[in-house]
Image (cartoon, rainbow, N blue to C red):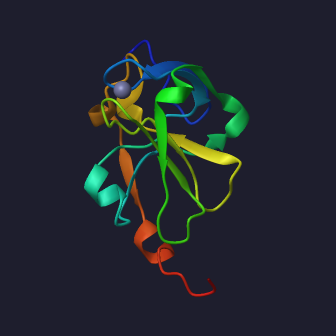
Amino acid sequence: MNAVNTQAHKSSHTGSCHCGAVKFEVRSALLPATRCNCSLCKRKGALMSPVFAVDDLHIVEGAEALAMYQFNTRSAQHFFCKICGIYPFHQTRKDARLWRVNLGCLDGVDAYTLESVIADGASLSVVEEA
Ligand SMILES: [Zn+2]
């Protein structure tokens, strides 16, 4: 995508869930696109952005259409649209101030053309101190 800056620095994007109830703006880098092998992400199969600060995410429309799912350590917050079921973004487990978006939800971004890496979320999923 020529119009989209895929370099490591951040760029601004608009995005939405599938049905359009949830619309958001985000300022994030696109690379490296990340897949995660945790028990949730391996089912979702989404390509995610690198982490960005919570202040860089703005929900424009449809905050009331979002539901939130938590599992295991219950520190991450996984949001999805109650109508279409799509995951647009989540708050990471490591740091509540750091979020990732679903690159497939961004307007004008072909997530499948981006180089991707695999995050080893599976090894973070074991609760030892809880
Ligand atoms: Zn939706």
Q: Which residue is found at the position 60% from the left and 62% from the top?
A: 75
Of residues 130 and 2, the one nearer the viewer is 130
x%, y% of residue 9? 62, 32
Q: Position of residue 74 (x, y in %)?
A: 56, 65
Determine whether 62 is above or below 126 in the image.
Answer: above
Q: Which residue is drawn at the image coordinates 38% and 65% (left, top)?
A: 38
Direction top: furthest residue = 3
- Seen in the picture, residue 39 relative to 44 is either above or below; the reply is below
The image quadrant of residue 103 is: top left
Q: Is residue 31 visible?
A: no
Query: Ligand 1 lies in which image quarter?
Result: top left
Residue at 45% of width from left, 76% of height from top?
A: 123
Q: Residue furthest bottom?
A: 128
Decide: is 2 above or below 56: above
Q: Residue at x 43, y 43 (%)?
A: 48
Q: Which quarter of the figure has residue 73?
A: bottom right
Q: Which of the 4 image quadrants contains residue 58? A: top right
Quadrant, the C terminus? bottom right
Q: Is residue 116 left or right of residue 125?
A: left
Q: Considering depth in this image, is 63 or 120 the residue closer to the camera?
A: 63
User: Which quadrant of the rendered structure holds the N terminus?
Assistant: top left
